[in-house]
Amino acid sequence: MEKNELVAWENKCIQEESPECTSACPLHVNAKLFLKEIQKGDWDAAYKVLNKTMPFPAILGRICDHPCEERCKRGAVGGPLAIGALERFCVERYAGKKRVQLLPRKDHRIAVIGAGLAGVTAAWDLLKKGFSVSVFEPGDRLGGSLWDLPEQLLPREVIMEELSTLETMMADIRLGIQLDTALFEQVCEEYEAVILDRDSLRGIELSLKLDDDGLIAITAATGATDRDRIFAGGGTRFRGGFSPVMETLEGRRPALSIERLMQKVGLEFGRENEGPCSSRLHTSLEGIDPLPRIAPSDSIKGYMEEEALIEAKRCIQCECLECVKKCLFLERYKAYPKKYAREIFNNERILLGAAHQYNVFTNSCSTCGLCETICPNDFSMADLCLEARRTLLKQKIMPPSFHEFALQDMAHSTGELFSLCRHEPDKTESAWLFFPSCQLCGTTPDEVVSSYRYLRDRLSGGVGILLHCCGAPAFWAGREDLFKEALDEIRATWAELGKPRIITACSTCLNIFQEHVPAMKPVSLWDIILEVGIPDSARANGTTGNTVGVVDPCATRHNPAEQKGIRKILTSLGIQIEELPLSGEMPECCGYGGLMYNANPSLARDVIARRTTVSDNDYLAYCAMCRDNFASAGKRVSHLIEHLFPAVSGGDPAARSWISWSERRANRGRVKEMILRDRGERDEAQVEEYEKLKLTISPDVLKRIDGRRILEDDIRKVIFHAETSGKKMRSRESGSYLAYLQPENVTFWVEYSPEGDGFTVLNAYCHRMKIVGILQ
Amino acid sequence: MNFSQEAAVWSCTSCGGELGLIKVGFTYMKGNFEIDLPACAACGLVLVPESLALGKMAEVERILEDK
């Protein structure tokens, strides 16, 4: 990932955007944090939040005209937070003489003419930054219009005390000056830059261009007048009404311009978001209790502490996190996409030997696309993680354990034990090509073969068959080489058959073909069934009247037509439908997608466990892996094909238990065998000697070893090796044997005992750490 | 970790010999490790107990994978 790509990714995630209140505030006071501190009861910390951004917080905190409240999200659920009144309460009780931190002195002399709120703000900001500041005020006191405010709101001693800070900060204050053109020109001559507070200078002729209100004309973004080094601001009372907070901004803005001028940097660059600005932060108000705004019992004195606390607690602490709320993977790593993008970027740049820490993370995303659908800005963790996986491969630091098992499973599907391509028996042409998918063949071999027979019966022009893998596991693993290889093979076979129309029974295959070989014009088996009619075998099935929760696979997210078609089929079968919360365009992955189950099995188990509890009804899946994952979590679930082409008429497909990885492979082999048998052909795949070993495995042991991703053939290899080489250990206690073998990257251990003409498997486990041997 | 109990339970079938605790070398993702494990000095057969394979060893594998 390049730096500019990171910036683009980060910009898409809006979680760190300022909330509406802060964006609406001309000074960008962090009102969210201010309210959070009050919620905690920490008023001193709340005051510090104000003090960080506001000049003279004891003044502004009392009189601010709080434009933040207009945009408060709470406004839609009970009324906006009384931020202004809470600020007032806070500064009345907790403002004290705080030490002002000054930056090192700079060798620049600046003049501020006019000491209204804008002028004193400019002086405050410049003094804090280390400039020498002289304040020239025609009147006999600092503060200008502040003195016109009601004393109850702003006591006189508060004005005096707060503004006296300027003296503490070593401002050179000159009151009662006779301001005329001569003095003005003299000041312009003596100082490096000048700020004019328009609040108190209207009507004084200073040979500067004026605007329509009779105020000194300025450039809005910088406060610059028509003369070099002369800036101005303030005077809101002549433009629609005195706004303390805008007055403050209008003092702060020219002060910043002067700082830039002294640093010799551009005055205008990057100041778009200064002052009130829009916010991209999205905050869901779903489920938020519409609590009413608390009015102070004494409207003149303002809040009592208890009232203030209750009011502050209404703040919902705006944030997005919509994707994190829905996705267990995003939640598990305790951050959000913007941070994750940064972590992935850093992970790619770590020097050899240091901890990466984000390898597992990068490979745990199911790439289901739910976050992208939810995100107001379409942030796709799938795209981010897939690209990062390709980078890990290029950097040669992708641990093999993350995808090896899945890629071996894919190799089985693309290899001679499963892959097959034939025209329809007795035909030499194919108008259609049935691609049932490797995983559906692994789940429901008999039903797949029945569906193929049905298609041949109902469609004309010849229905060929192609048993293969679409390459999705390689795509998810970032293995572009393997993915291309699988797809090229399919494409070549398809072309050889005369480019028939592809019918597939797997939504993932459908997506892969649509996206990568659109010329195939792939169509789903379910759409074809709707066209040619539901088989009679389905109508005879005993599922009529049941209610099922329909589990839409994540791969159908952008295919509402397919989802609708499924419901149509179910309805015509007399099956009642329960719509689960995450259906339609919102389905979550079952943990198979993106190979999450391989790289992060415990997360995949948690994902599926959470989803099984959503409804007590049986689930109905139309993705083989959804079916199998729910089944292995103990949920009653069936696959649509089991209803359409039941292997046992009148049976209860949801009662079928989980399927081991070994069984899946064996089932795929059976599909190939049955199809060949239909054609009068024989499967000529060579059977290895070890494959002939007969194993007895109890259900408990089978479930345990399958969870460890150990196949029965792995076990056969170990026992075959032990029995032929004699390399094994014997237990003095039970007489059983223990043997091990490392066929590739994994070392498999099997405890077994001979039983008749075969072997009983008592246990199996494995590790990836390679045994080098006994050290001398 | 002491695997003397495992060493006492299992014997090498090839030579019929006892297993003793011997230093065994392992390697994974550019990392090298040594552990005292039950092994047959004569045949070179070693024993990685299930508790080690699924416990400490799996833990180290995961750490190395995130390196």
Image: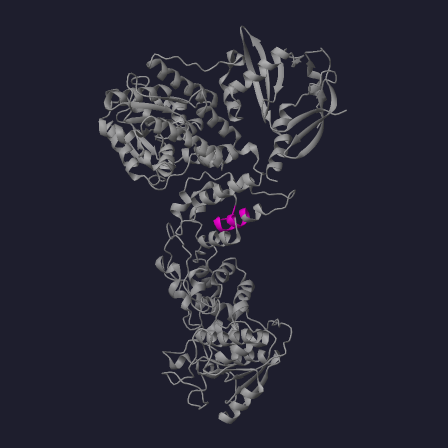
Location of residue A420 in the rendering, given as x and y in whole percent from the top left corner: 39, 21
Q: Quick check: A33 above or below A678? A: below
Location of residue A609 in the rendering, given as x and y in whole percent from the top left corner: 45, 33
Q: Quick check: A497 above or below A359? A: above
Q: Residue A273's quadrant in the figure?
A: bottom left
Badge count? 0
Q: Quick check: B58 above or below A257? A: above
Q: Tell me the quadrant of the picture where the C terminus of chain A can be found.
A: top right
Taking the magenta stretch, the answer to whether it contains residue A296 is: no
Q: Is residue A413 visible?
A: yes
- Magenta-highlighted residues: A334-344
Taking the magenta stretch, the answer to whether it contains residue A341 is: yes
Q: Residue A746's quadrant in the figure?
A: top right
Judging depth in this view, the residue of A88 and A135 nearest the camera is A135
Tell me which secondary structure the magenta stretch mostly adopts.
helix
Q: Is residue A112 left or right of residue A639?
A: right
| Colour pattern | one colour
Judging depth in this view, the residue of A646 and A231 nearest the camera is A231
Location of residue A299 in the rendering, given as x and y in whole percent from the top left corner: 40, 71
Q: Is residue A160 left or right of residue B42?
A: left
